[in-house]
Each structure stands twice: as C-alpha cells, then as structure tokens.
Amino acid sequence: MAHGSTRPTSRDVAQAAGVSQAAVSLVLGDKWRGRVAETTAERVRQAARELGYRPNLAARNLRLGHTRTVLLVVPALTTEFFAGVYTGAARIAAQHGFGVVLYPSPEGIGPARDPFASAQAALDGVIASSMAADALTAIHGDQLPLVMLDSDPEGSLGAATVNLDITDGVRQVTEHLLGLGHRRFLHLAADIASWTFEVRARELATRIGQVPGTSLLTVRAPITIEDARDAAATALAAKGPRPTAIICDDDKLAAGAYKAVRRLGLRIPDDISVTGLDDLALATAIDPELTTVRLDAEQFGERGMQALLAVLEGREPTAGDIPVQLVVRGSTAPPSTP
Amino acid sequence: MAHGSTRPTSRDVAQAAGVSQAAVSLVLGDKWRGRVAETTAERVRQAARELGYRPNLAARNLRLGHTRTVLLVVPALTTEFFAGVYTGAARIAAQHGFGVVLYPSPEGIGPARDPFASAQAALDGVIASSMAADALTAIHGDQLPLVMLDSDPEGSLGAATVNLDITDGVRQVTEHLLGLGHRRFLHLAADIASWTFEVRARELATRIGQVPGTSLLTVRAPITIEDARDAAATALAAKGPRPTAIICDDDKLAAGAYKAVRRLGLRIPDDISVTGLDDLALATAIDPELTTVRLDAEQFGERGMQALLAVLEGREPTAGDIPVQLVVRGSTAPPSTP
DNA sequence: CGAAGGAAGTTATACGTAAAACTTGTGGAG
DNA sequence: CTCCACAAGTTTTACGTATAACTTCCTTCG
C-alpha cells in the first residue's frame, strides 16, 4: 500500500552504491565487462536489490526507440482457438524478450477514438488475424511491420502471411467422407466474411464436384450453437433426398448440427455423419465425440510471432502452411441409406 | 512497407505548420483554448494529418509519469470465462482511456526472467485473478495499485477485492437439488488450490450437512473432460448407495460427469442429476442441456477495472459481490430411486 | 495617452535511461 | 624515466513529449 513514495530511479541506485548513474546502467544492462570492476558491479546490484529498483520502461523505450512489444489482433476472444494463438505467440515472444498485447478487433471493446490509440506508438509490430485487408491498411497505415494470419497471400499488401493448410484439411475431410460412401452433403458454413472460409467453401465445392453423382448444399450461420441448430434444421427439413453428411466450418456449428439432427429423431452417425473444424474441448464433450480437423492454434501463434521477428530483423519469414490433421471419432460412419 | 523512414515527431509537425513544438502539443492535446488561434490550430491539425503523425507513447508516458495501462493476470486462457473477464475489463478501460495487457500467469508462457519484466514499469496498476496471495506479493512487491478478483477479502494484503457471490450460487444449487428431493450428493471438485473453490466446498458441506439424512462425497479432478470423466466414474463405481446428483465445480467437469454416467448405462437426468458452474457454450452443447450457475464474466471484468480505477483515483471501490444466477435446464430432475 | 490585461504564441525544462565520448590512475614495455 | 595502453570509471547528451514560465503585440479603459 506504500505506492505513494515514488519509485527509485537508476540515479537513486547510483547514489546508494556511490557510483554514477551511467555505471548503474552499464552494470544492470550487463554491458559492464571491462568497464566496471566486479566488486563495484556487485555493490550496484546489491543497492538495486535493496531499493527494489525496476527500470522505467517508458524511459528505456524512448531512449532505445523500440518497445519490444507487438500487438496481436484477433477477431474476438470467444473461443479457445485464439487463446491458443495468443499463448503460442506469447511463448515465442517471451523467448526473445518481447511482450504481446492483445486487441480483440471488431466490436466488443467499445469505441476508443482510434483502436490503436492506446498502443500504436508503443509497438514494434503487429500480427493480425482474419481481418479484411482494407480495414488493416487503415489501421497500420504502412507504419508498422505486419504479419497476417489466415489471410490471402496475394492480397495482403505485401505483408508476410502465415496460414493453416486449409486446403489439405478439406482434402482430408472429403476423402474420409467420400471413402465412407457419402454422396449427398450439407455444408454448414460460418457466416463470416473471411478469406479462410471462402477458400474452404471453394475447395469443398471443387473436390465434391469432381466426383460424379454427388450433391452439395450450403447454408450459412453465425457461429453460435443456436444459430447453427436452426440453420441446419431448416436445411434438413427441405424436400428432396436428405444429405447423409454435414460438413461444418467450426466445432460449434457442429454442436448445433447435432441438435438439429436429434430434433428430427435421427441419430449420429447412423443416419447422418457430422464433421467439425478446430478440435475444441467441445468436440469431445458432445456425444458421439466429433470427427473434426485439428488446428494447432499454438503453433499458429508461434509461427506468426516467428514471422514477425523475421520481418523485424530483415530476414525472410519461413514459408509453408501449417499442417492440419483430421481426427476421426464417433460422428462419422458409412451412410445407411444409399 | 515504407517503415524505414522514421516516424514524424511533434517537431516535424511544428515545422510543417510553421509553429513551435509547444503549440503542436497544445493543439493536439486539446489544451489550446485561449492559447492558440483557431486558424493556427486548424493548420496544426492539418499538418499532423498530412504527416500521419502519432504521438510517441513512450515519450508521453515518461513525461506524464503514468501509462494508462493496466495488467490483467489470469490463471490461463483455456476457457471462455477469462476471455469474458478480459473483454469486460477492456471495455471499461477503453472508456477511461486505459489499455489492458494480459498476462496468463502460471506456466504456459515460458520463463521470462521476471514475469513482469516486459511490463512492470509501464503499468499503472494490476488486476489479478485467482492467485495465491504470496505469489502476488512477490510479483507486485507493494509497487503497484492492485485489485484482486476471486480472492479472500481477509487475506489480500489490504488490496481491494472483487468477488462473485459464490456463496449464493451454492445456496441456489443446493436449494434446487434438495427441493427436487435429492439427498445423496457427489461433489466433483476442481483440483485447484483457489480460494473460490475452497469457499465453495465448505459452503456446500455446511448447507447439505444441515439437512438430516443427507450424504456428500467429494472427489477432485483437474479441469479437463477426460480427468473429470475418470474421477466421476471411479466415484460412481464405489460400493454403497449411489449418489443421485453430481454437483460440479465447472461446466467442463460436468461434461466429464456426463460421460461417466453414460458409460454406466445410466441416464441424465432420470437416473442422475448433474449441475455445473460457469455457463459456457459447452453447457448448451451437451445433451441434455446443463443446469448450471451462470457467472457473468464480463461484469466481473468490468467491476474489477472499475475497482482499480477507484483505487487509482484514491476513491473507495464499490463494495458488494457480483450476483450469480442458477439456470435450470434439462440435466436436473427429481431422483427416481429414493 | 498610459497602463493594464488578455490573446497568441515561444522558450526552456524535466521525465529516466543508454551509450558515446571523455577523464583519471596504474602498471609495464622500451 | 617516459610514454602508452588499458581498466575503471564519469560527464554529457539525446530520445519526444507536456507544461510552466516567459514574451510580444494589440485592444481597451480610466
């Protein structure tokens, strides 16, 4: 409770140790070899410890001209996925003496005059996930090194991009389902204007379209269980032969699909197979456990941070998409009605 | 990609507008009324816009002696709950021109030399959730204004505390279950040394103990679905009359309990009732939907931030716990076997 | 008509740090 | 004995901002 007494500065430490402020900076900055005697150095460290000295970061940042802090822009914090991305990014950052500040982008936070007002100048770089490229230009205005996650490599203003191998994820899902014998598909798509989901939809259509005798119906829903349930219910109630497999853009959507299926008195996977995307905790909580594509969120964050570090150091970021892995569980089986 | 050219400073703006640096600071800091002519002010703003000027926050922070940034310490980011706390805190912070930096505390981030090394000096205050008080002293060393979430009001070193009304949550759950006729309870407890959960266990024992003819068995499990499933399965397999209701410290634990129950070939809620705590998305994803206690995470964060602002301004934080609300869904019913 | 007071600025300074440039003292080589 | 190299510091300065203190000019009023 004694935070009334102003914090000690390096000058206070210097006085206590009987040396100049410069000497303190040298010793504590670990640049003292050959410049300060070991005994003096120890005296300085001792004094710093006793006074509880912490360098003033604002002053240091000003002097150094950088902050060793980067901003991670995520679309929202509603899911474990971005928590994972953050964790991964923060881990790599910490290893390099960097900090990561989070900015959940769209609404949610309330209108700061400028979303970056509280951070902009104090940042060394930005990692932005799933944002429209134009919104992003407005934000960073070419001022800060930038890495984009989950973004079109072509349309990213020359910024480095790090992506999950979504195309391969679609391949694994469709091969699995086609291999089981499914031919009539419902795509329960996320109602989000994002490059990833567009690629996914396109790829899905292509892959399924290549096989003769297949059909693909697409419905969109916001990523909540209730919305997904209603959208899926409507689609399943439509006339004509019922789909035998529902491919969902997200595990939450899949949870909604479960409810719709169950409401019709049908069973998973006997009557209808369901697949998800993400592999959240949700996937193993529901019954039957969900066949889904595991996205390694932490690795995603790690790679994003590594790419940003590369940009900051003028190196070329490592290329290549992050592999994803289909996890087959109990929600998929061969169709009963051919 | 042109971030090679150094960013413009207020001096550059001054030169472009043909005024002194002080005038720029006055105008842009909105302190110019009666000090600078409107036409000059407009000229300055114009120049600032054209140069894309952003004040250097490091310099401002140094000058002002504060950062308008607070740290939010959370135990981990694995659940939506703390995402909600963050969102609430950030909302209030933004309204007051503050930023919130996140620090997921225990492991997870990897060993920075000092967890606060990257932030400490640049902070105005700390909101810490669910940490042991001693770990906390080590961290903040009486240096920064502090608000504790979910923490013992008695043992918090005089720091302000903001808590959920856990006691009332227990009351609602036990009254609901006792009212349905349940008498034999299994408490599936979170295996976490945290004040909240201790209070909860104690209160539960007291409340149930007050009613004649009741029994209460407690088992602990880490908060994962698999651990919870195994712990619950073991407990349910024990000899003696089987519990008719499982009270879980967390929705994820409840999801695990579902699996254990189902594995025994029993049905929820017909054979066994289950309750949770949190009201995550999970709660409505599982079947039947979970009867649980809704914690308003965002309000929790908001109140925490408000309390910290109060401390920073020398005011007394608002007292009073945050209300919680039992949400009755399909996982609870009267016991079939008396 | 002189002085006062306000408008519209400018000049100077401090915040705390890091590091370049300078100083002093000492031992050893020539 | 002189000079130099090196250890062990110190002095000084700059980073970009906000603001207190000062200046200058013009208007207005007694």
Image (tube, coloured by chain):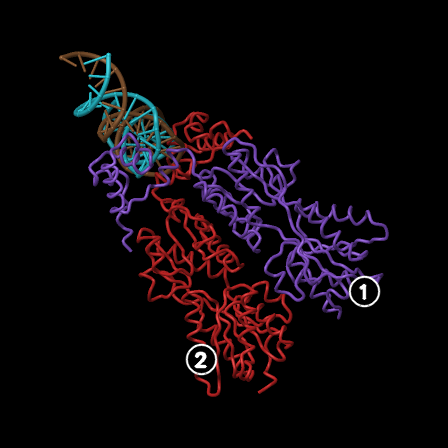
Chain colours: A red, B purple, C brown, D cyan
Please tell me if label 1 and label 2 are on a single chain. Answer: no
Label 1 CA crowd tier, 10 Å (few <14, some 14–19, many 20+)? few
Circle 1: residue type: Ser
Q: CA distance from mark 1 to mark 2?
A: 52 Å
Residue A203: which numbered mark, if any? none
Residue A207: which numbered mark, if any? 2
Element on which disc 1 rests = loop
| Residue A137 lies in quadrant | bottom left
Q: How many marks?
A: 2
Residue at screen point 71% across, 47% down: B200
Residue on which disc 1 sits = B336
Chain label for disc 2: A
Give the answer, above or below, for where A294 lies relative to B10: below
Q: Is residue D27 left or right of residue B224?
A: left
Measured from the top left, where is residue B215 in percent x and y?
82, 54
Measured from the top left, where is residue B134 in percent x and y?
61, 39
Q: Is residue C16 left or right of residue B170?
A: left
Chain label for disc 1: B
Circle 2: residue type: Arg
Measured from the top left, where is residue A12 in percent x and y?
44, 27
Nearer the observer, B215 or A217: A217
